[in-house]
Amino acid sequence: MTPQDVLAELTALQRDDVPTHGGATMAYVYDSGRTEVDELAAAAQAAFQWTNALDPTAFPSVARIENDLVGAALELLGGGPDAVGTLTSGGTESCALAVLAAREQWRARGGAGRPRMLLPVTAHAAFRKAAHLFGVEVVDIPVDPETCRADPSAVVRQLDERTVLVVVSAPSYPHGVLDPVGRIAGLAAGAGVPCHVDACIGGWVLPFLDDVPEPFDLSVPGVTSLSVDLHKYGYAPKGVSVLLTATPELRHAHWFSTAGWPGYPVVNPTLAGTRPAGVMAAAWAVHRWLGTDGYRDLARRAREATVRLAAGAAAVDGLRVVGRPVATLVALAADGPDGVDVLHLADEMTARGWLLQPQPPFAQDVGDLPATLHLTVTAATADRVEALLSDLRGAARAAAALPRPVPDPGLVAAAATIDPAALSVAEVEALLELAGVSGGSLPERMAPVHALVAALPRPVAERLLAGVLGRVYRPALSG
Ligand SMILES: Cc1ncc(COP(=O)(O)O)c(C=O)c1O
């Protein structure tokens, strides 16, 4: 075989993937629509692909790259004179390290008992993962069912001496709305509790827009840390994010160092040991190339497309836009009880070549959140808004003609009696067969599956969802 043959095989593996470019995949990927950005990123990544950012004293280039990118993020996002930061592998790691740092600082101050984190239900699931990993209890903060913004009065009620962190989103992933950052950060500060702004998705967009309703960054009193992903609207390849902290002490609280083994002295600013420098270099190159003007242009194009898209979608019979989208994300819901079922709508849009992400309904004490369809708009979608709206109108008509997806009541009743922790892998497989998910691939129409998942008790749904992925990841053995 030649290397070209191998590459051709690899490329063929992508045949069934959703497109990463062209603006029709409206989750997971961020396309600037500029080929020179992609080419530059690829070349930069190749130049640094063997470099290990584990040790910036052996590779001073990686320290320079990290310092430049953290400095740029601080300048963009209101960092004060003491603020510092760290490059991480992505949004989940940035959020996790923010939680770890807050917990460690609380412990260092003498905090006792089980640490708690106040988390708006719309905050990214990464914080739930962090809570799971670091032994932190999650206290759900409800959001207003109309605006989907976190409720400051619930924060007031829940702040106590075990609270290590309060989280807000700028904006939230599910609905693209901005939490009341100033109010909540102020309340947290009043109680001596740190406040993290998750700007993973909005942090490289909002600073370039004129119509942001309120300040949200590190300059807001009470905000102690902020996450922003370069692999989202920084238009860098996957695997790079920034965690900013208002003080070096808070950054130190998520670092790990040990001299307690016979090997090399270890200082890890992130969860990883070896850190890939390639993607950091790619982010540096894209940032250097686009500069403030380039990012402003891309952010404004995506924002302008979002506003057009939201207005067009709101005019479709049976659909409404949820809350007030402030950046480049839109969530669509059924307009009233007879509105279009958005789970069907997702399937209809898939059939028309678009990936819009279905989000299940969500129950909370102060009023449930409806099922929604999430759209992440990037610069590449800007030229296709009319085509998207035209397909959305057709898809909405088709979805409205379908019977609502209703989960099998027998299955739901049976699931309510299950203890998911006691299920073996084989039993999960059997349940998935019953639910109509068989073989290694998912059904073409996902609406019934999403409706079933939404009707199950959350722990059961979580176990079954993991089971679905267990079917996808099966070792391919050549013998
Ligand atoms: C607001 C927010 N936070 C955190 C994350 C997690 O980021 P990642 O997927 O890079 O781990 C996302 C991802 O979309 C996000 O939108």
Image (cartoon, helix red, strand yellow):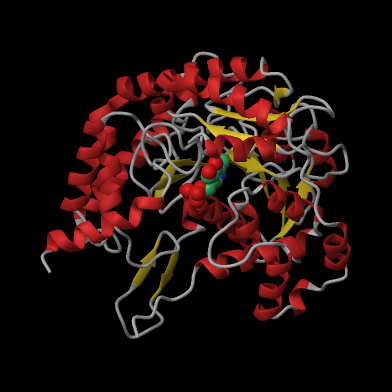
- Rendered residue at 73%/61% (across/down): 461
Residue 23: % across, % down: 42, 31
Question: Does residue 256 appear to the left or right of 445 in the view shown?
Answer: left
Point 31% across, 44% down: residue:
67
Quadrant in the rendering for residue 289: top left
- Viewer-nearest residue: 71 or 39: 39
> Residue 445's x, y, as percent?
62, 48
Look at the picture and state if 153 lies above or below 136. Answer: above
Query: How many numbered discs sit on the rendered protein?
Result: 0
Q: In this image, 337 relative to 246: left or right? A: right
**Relative to 234, is 138 on the left or the right?**
right
Q: Quadrant of the N terminus?
A: bottom left
| Residue found at the far left of this picture | 2
Q: Position of residue 425 (x, y in %)?
A: 65, 78
Q: Residue 45: tell me if it is visible.
A: yes
The residue under the point 42% across, 69% down is 257
The answer to which of 367 and 126 lies nearer the viewer is 367
Q: Quadrant of the C terminus?
A: bottom left
Please report the residue visible at 80 percent of the width from the left and 50 percent of the height from the top: 160
The image position of residue 450, as x and y in percent, is: 70, 50
- Which residue is more in the foreground, 410 or 134? 410
Nearest the viewer among 349 and 428 is: 349
Please indicate, yes or no, whether residue 50 appears anywhere in the rendered image.
Answer: no
Say above or below: 377 vs 139: above
